Amino acid sequence: MATHSRHDTGARRRPAAVIVGMMGAGKTRLGKEMSQMLGIGFADADQQIEDAIGMSIPKYFARHGEAAFREVERRTVAETLGSFDGIYALGGGAPMTPAVREALHDYAEHGGRVIYLLADPSEAMERARRGGGRPMLDGDADARWMALYEQRDPVYRQVANVIVRTHGMTPKAAARKMIEMTNEGIVHVDGAGIEPYDVRIGEGALNHLPDVLGAGPVRVALIHTQSVQRHSDRARAILRKAGYEVSDIVIPDAEAGKTVQVADGIWQRLGNEGFTRSDAIVGLGGGACTDLAGFVAATWMRGIRYVNCPTSLLAMVDASTGGKTGVNTPQGKNLVGSFYTPAGVLADLRTLTSLPNDIFIEGLGEVAKSGFIRDPEILTILEDHADELRAFDGEAFLDSPLKPVVAELIERTVRVKAHHVRADLKEAGLREFLNYGHTFGHAIEQLEHFRWRHGNAVAVGMVYAAELSNLTGHLDRPTVEYTYDLLDRLGLPTSWNGAGFDEVLALMHRDKKARGNTLRFVGLEEIGRPFHLDDPDPQTVREAFERVRQQA
Ligand SMILES: NC(=O)c1ccc[n+]([C@@H]2O[C@H](COP(=O)([O-])OP(=O)(O)OC[C@H]3O[C@@H](n4cnc5c(N)ncnc54)[C@H](O)[C@@H]3O)[C@@H](O)[C@H]2O)c1
Ligand SMILES: O=C(O)C(=O)C[C@@H](O)[C@H](O)[C@H](O)COP(=O)(O)O
């Protein structure tokens, strides 16, 4: 499980995954299957306890009572969580003990995966009955099982960070799904004014859709573009299987879909199809689609639940997280919108299999931005893998050595985004650093009538910001040269000559960071140290433009 090693904080051993769930859910069966597939060990808490007490659990229960049993269980679980590195299945009642919950919470906080195995109740009841020897089911077994389920289900949901539904699956298919869903990166986003949510990055992340949407919505509007039909078909199947009524809404591709006219068409459909406040929206596509879907969610009945399923690299690393939603107007990019936080972000790496090479490369622009403003390790990874990244081939991606590299770049970039959003949701200061390269970049997009892709425009915008920082005496020349060199190696543009200075300047004055007649930029003092560059000398603003243009 590659993801876990990324979170390792020391030499301490800990399970690759812990499985919780009701009696009869298949924790032992599927845990063994997972451990065989992964070639790692398996431990079952009930078996460990029976070995330790030297008798069967029912006998121990009868002699010493439940409280004594729970104490042995607590000790066993605590010890195993700190010393075992295979798959660990817990007894159904273990998470009901507060100390076990705390230990699981600590384990999950340090990157551990707690899987709630959610089987179909009738299947699980039947298995639990067949298994016998379960003191908690004494009497009417099915009624007892149901009562325990009602008690325990909310607790399992609280301790787990992965919920896997196995209804109708063979044990092998279920174990494969469990491996897939645990082997993913999770970035938690919280902060003032933010209902906390997770960004999940991995193959099969779309499987989380029902659990992120929850039981509230009856209807779900699945907003997507034609270009991602294959993936929206998969999302629709997952949603329908979970019992939602799905409205399929196809919008125009790219920036053409990010308009108030498109939003209006969707508002009309939601109205005609009876969408209420408890219903939900899923935006599946590139950043233009998730921006638009979020905007519709923010405005429909003043705000309904939404989940983003980004399918381009750029949307995975940036657009889908942080709650900036909006549309463009003829006067500029993203001029109308709202800060509105998603309920979750599911970045399914499988969707990248259909992503064209040039759109993947565009996404590297925002990845590099995050390296420049905060995480230099991102730049090192980009340097080390520039040739392979530049040669990205979606069809070969999932089986290629590039997959873990891209997964790590996505997770690191999302962490940079989460850091800024957490501290400053509504962009009063720190969050503006995420706008590095955007003042000039947005002007290019507008002047090129969106024929230039966002990430490419931001790449040139970063060159402009680096030159401006250099001209104002903040950034050394080698770092400016490094910016040109790295972006160039990744296949990103570093110059632009599409319009005159006055047109660019007029658009930069309309940037959202501008105040009154004052231009405001994000500059760089050194890699990892952005700063607010307010009201720079007009001559320098022009000179930086000339430098970027001269290269073209
Ligand atoms: N909200 C934010 O915080 C934020 C952050 C960064 C960018 N953005 C916005 O995001 C947009 C740019 O995002 P983008 O680069 O994803 O552009 P995009 O949405 O235009 O997608 C690029 C192209 O790739 C296609 N595509 C996407 N995923 C695909 C897949 N898996 N297979 C095949 N084709 C696929 C799209 O249909 C489109 O043609 C801009 O509008 C930008 O302003 C928003
Ligand atoms: O999340 C942010 O904040 C950003 O600035 C991220 C940018 O990369 C992104 O392009 C965003 O859409 C720009 O927003 P805007 O406020 O400049 O329109």
Image (tube, grey):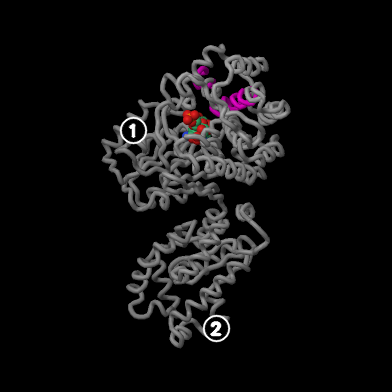
Q: Decide: few, some or many residues near mark 2? Use Cα within 10 Å; few <14, some 14-19, many ≥20.
A: few
Q: Earlier in the sequence, mark 1 or mark 2?
A: 2
Which element type, helix, strand or loop, lies under badge 1? helix
Q: Amino acid at mark 1?
A: Ile
Which residue is more in the foreground, 393 or 464?
Answer: 464
Query: Do the CB atoms of the residues marked 1 and 2 lie less than 8 Å apart?
Result: no
Query: Residue 515 at what x, y percent from top left?
Result: 46, 24
- Residue 173 in percent (x, y) is at 52, 58
Q: Is residue 112 above or below residue 299?
A: below
Q: Which residue is mark 1?
A: 266
Q: Is residue 415 above or below residue 96?
A: above
> Which residue lies under the disc numbered 2?
53
Q: Is residue 286 visible?
A: no
Please, which residue is most extreme toward the bottom here? 63
Stretch of the chain drawn in magenta: 444-467
Quarter of the view holding residue 226: top left
Which residue is painted at 54% across and 20% down in the image? Answer: 444
* Relative vertical location of residue 136 with respect to residue 36 in this rendering, above or below: below
